[in-house]
Amino acid sequence: MTHNDSDIRFMRLAIEQAQEAAAEGEVPVGAVVVCDGEVVACGKNRRETWQDPSAHAEMIAMRRAADEIGSWRLEGCTVYVTQEPCPMCAGALINARVERLVFGARNPKAGAVRSLHELLDDGRFNHAVEVEESALAEECGDVLTDFFKAVRDGTAPPKPSPDG
């Protein structure tokens, strides 16, 4: 699949977020919300730091975007995320009325867009999200693979302390 220059540029920003998460001992997933061609918000996984099961990169980025825009409706926005969203995040994309999702690597253990489920393709929901997959998929996958290899080797940064 060929992606446009904007998709590649914004996915590179999401990869930077994922790399920051990895350096902080978080599972390296990054997300960027773009509206009208402008970055509105970014997010990276913070589950360990915040001890919050909902602190996924795309959830954080969408919350920040809603704050920035002043509305929970992210109509006309595109969410770029380095890994295929889980069921929680896919549901949030629908609920936020996100126009488009662009993701990098598939998530064979929890992916709810293509891998395990296809929630965004279910016409029974009140909103449809356009999906583009595999944007910089290899690079996105490498960030995850390298992180988990470092965890197994004992060379990964320690998990963040919730106390700061």
Image (cartoon, rainbow, N blue to C red):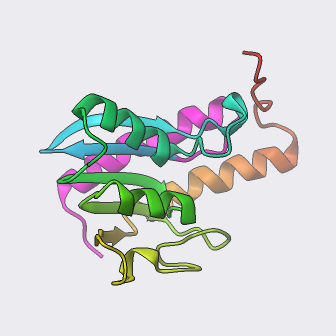
Depth check: give the residue in front, 155 or 83. 83
- Quadrant showing the C terminus: top right
Where is residue 75? Give x, y as percent.
20, 53
Depth check: give the residue in front, 31 or 15. 31
In this rendering, the answer to whether 30 lies above or below 118 is: above
25 falls in the magenta region:
yes
In this rendering, the answer to whether 38 lies above or below 50 is: below
Give me the residue at 30% from left, 76% from top.
Answer: 1
Where is residue 60? Give x, y as percent.
47, 39
Where is residue 151? Give x, y as percent.
81, 45
Depth check: give the residue in front, 74 or 112. 74
In this rendering, the answer to whether 92 lies above or below 48 is: below
In this rendering, the answer to whether 163 lies above or below 13 is: above
110 falls in the magenta region:
no
Res. 135 image quadrant: bottom left
Q: Which span of residues is magenta-colored?
A: 1-29
